[in-house]
Structure formats: C-alpha cells, structure tokens
Image (spheres, rainbow, N blue to C red):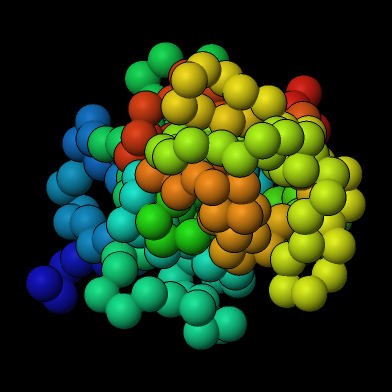
Amino acid sequence: MTEHIRLAKRVAEQLNCSRSTAEQFIEGGFVSVDGRVVEAPGARVRPDQGVAVAPDASPLALTPVTLLLHKPPGFEAGLGLAGGNPHGSRSQGAPEAATLLGAASHLPEDASGIRVLQRHFKQLECFTPLPTEASGLVVYTQDKRIARKLAEDIEVLEQECIVEVRGDMVPNGLQRLCHGLSFNGRPLPPIKVSWQNETRLRFALKGIRPGQVPAMCEAVGLAVVSLKRIRIGRVPLAKVPEGQWRYLQPWEKF
C-alpha cells in the first residue's frame, strides 16, 4: 500500500499539470487505469499500472447537466438538494426519487449524446416537487441558471398533468373545472381542462398547490385515481418509462 498513490497525483505528474486539472480530467471520464475508465480522483494506483489520458481530454467538457426523471408513485421529490428536503414535506417511509438516478436507469434511447458520468449525479438540485403518490416529470439540475429559473418561475410555468378519475361528474362539471372553483378559500384562475378519454382528464395550469387537483375533482363529483405530470413549461417528459431518466438537451428551454 505504501507504493500506491492517488490517481490525481499520478495524472498531474504525467501531464505536468495542476492537481485540480488532473481531478477534472478524471471526473470527466477521460482517464483509464489498465484500460478501465476510473472517475474517482482519490483512487489508488500502483507504479506498474498503466494510466492513460484520452487525447480529447478537456476541462471545458465538464459542463453542468440537467436530468429529467419519470418519478414513479411512492417516491419523494421535494425542494432543494437531491440528498434532502429542507422544507420537511417528506412522507414518512417514502424513499427519495433521487435514488433512482444512476447509469443503470438512464434511458437507452436518450438522443442527447451525453456520456453518462458519476459526476452527473452529484450536487443536483430539485425545484419541481411532486406529491409522493403522483408520478411524472421531475427535474434535477447542476446548472445554476436552470436552478434559478425553476426556483423563481415555477409559479408561472404551465404544468400539464394527466389525471385518472372515477365517479360521475356533476352537470357542467367540466366548465366549473375550467373556471368557477375555489381552493383554500380563494377563487382559482381560469384553467385548461379537457377529457383525454372516458376516465382521464388533462389539466394545464400554473401555480399548482399541493392537494389542489384532487380537491377540484372532488368538487365536481370525481375521485382521483392517479396523477401524472407530463410537461413543465416547454419541456415534456416524452417517452421516458417510469423509473428512468434522460438528459435535458441544449435546445430545450423551460
């Protein structure tokens, strides 16, 4: 073990660069040990092991990423860092949706072309909470600009949800859903609601509050069976299966 040294030190010596630059190359997936990519700067290597740095290695490639997860029901997705919810809305016993993020759950058909790295699952923030019992689009980001956009504008970004219901709607119930209901003692603004099929309603609304959609449905004689968010702003969930995620592409804007 006395002969083992940190991989970052070995790379810095080989390239005659700073230790921080060497760490960036390693975390960027540009360094291999005996032909196997290693992304941990603190990994220990022996003098006889071959350490190679890819010819296209560049710290400029280490840009922050945004992940779009299809959260299944039963998982918590709250505000703040992916590792915890500072607002205390975590449901007792519900696992965090962030635990689903990993290389194994990456959408195989992801068209972004981004290479999956372990660093993509660190320092993620979530400003798109979703009830534990609901499913659908949840956004995790390392990009400070996107985090600020979501934190400041989530109230004005239109969200689209598909709501499965049961029961018999009261007369003029659809019109009341669109405009005419109150929630928590306050009149609701006009909302776009339409039937997708015999048992599913499509809601497109802004400034949604916890419990709002079930309360609206109950007011017109319906009970919510399931709720799935399929769009935030201009970014859709697309064809991402439950429990999988894809990268936000550069041209996609909320």
Image vertical order of residue 91 relative to residue 173, above or below: below
Residue at image location 59% in from the left, 59% down from the top? 215
Which residue occupies the foreground of this view, 242 or 51? 242
**Extreme residue toward the front, this view:** 171
- The quadrant where residue 158 appears: top right
Which residue occupies the foreground of this view, 96 or 60? 96
The C terminus is located in which quarter? top right
Whether residue 170 sits left or right of residue 251 in the image: it is left
Residue at image location 26% in from the left, 75% down from the top? 93
Which residue occupies the foreground of this view, 213 or 245? 213
Residue at image location 17% in from the left, 68% down from the top? 3
Residue 13: percent from left, percent from top = 46, 55
The N terminus is located in which quarter? bottom left
**Extreme residue toward the left, this view:** 1
* Residue 4, visible in the rendered structure: yes
Residue 119: percent from left, percent from top = 47, 52
* Residue 29, visible in the rendered structure: no
Residue at image location 61% in from the left, 40% down from the top? 170
Residue 117: percent from left, percent from top = 43, 41
Whether residue 64 sits left or right of residue 12 in the image: it is right
Whether residue 107 sits left or right of residue 252 in the image: it is left
The tally of labels here is 0
Image vertical order of residue 108 relative to residue 24, above or below: above
- The quadrant where residue 34 appears: top left
Residue 149: percent from left, percent from top = 83, 53
- The quadrant where residue 199 appears: top left
